């Protein structure tokens, strides 16, 4: 694990999301894989209300995100978040058939 990955995991663990966003700004695309399928549902629920649309976007695309959270994100103010949540909901519906 790299130093940045350790810092990210610490920030997620302490819920210092604003500090985490500031740290990751110079690293485009670094959020990919940070909010992954091992992220707890409780943390995903918490992050779904984050003020940063990029965080909400990755929560919307996470397969561990509860359906109620996805439904909420499908009405998000950010178009990309809404679309990603819609894709996740359709994927769940397709998998349930």
Image (spheres, grey):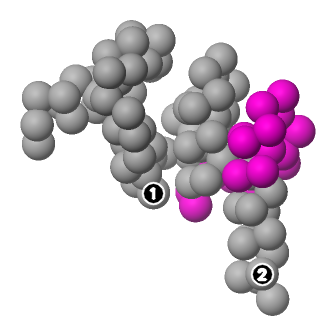
Query: Which element carries disc 2, helix, strand or loop?
Result: helix
Vertical side of 33 occupied by 57: above or below: above
Vertical side of 75 occupied by 95: above or below: below
x, y percentage for residue 72? 83, 40
x, y percentage for residue 51? 65, 17
Outermost residue to the bottom: 97
Q: Which residue is mark 1?
A: 37
Q: Is residue 5 left or right of residue 3?
A: right
Outermost residue to the right: 75
Q: Is residue 52 left or right of residue 49?
A: left
Measured Cα–Cα span from mark 1 to mark 2: 19 Å
Query: Which element carries disc 1, helix, strand or loop?
Result: loop
Residue pictured at 37% horizontal, 49% vertical: 33
Residue pictured at 66% horizontal, 47% vertical: 60
Mark with earlier residue (1, 2): 1
Residue pictured at 73% horizontal, 71% vertical: 92
Residue 87's tag is none
Q: Which residue is mark 2?
A: 94
Badge 2 density bin: few <14, some 14–19, many ≥20, Cα 10 Å: few
x, y percentage for residue 84? 71, 52
Asked if the magenta segment contains residue 83, the reply would be yes
Q: Which residues are magenta?
A: 63-84
x, y percentage for residue 78? 78, 32
Residue pictured at 32% horizontal, 21% vertical: 26
Q: Is residue 91 left or right of residue 10?
A: right
Viewer can see residue 22: yes
Vertical side of 90 occupied by 95: above or below: below
């Amino acid at each position: 694990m790299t130093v940045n990955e350790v810092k990210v995991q610490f920030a997620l663990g302490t819920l210092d999301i604003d500090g985490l966003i500031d740290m990751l700004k110079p690293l485009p695309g670094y959020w990919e894989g940070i909010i992954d399928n091992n992220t707890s549902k409780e943390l995903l629920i918490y992050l779904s209300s984050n003020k940063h649309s990029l965080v909400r976007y990755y929560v919307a695309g996470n397969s561990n995100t509860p359906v109620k959270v996805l439904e909420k994100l499908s009405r998000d103010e950010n178009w990309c978040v809404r679309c990603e949540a819609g894709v996740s909901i359709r994927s769940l519906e397709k998998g349930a058939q």
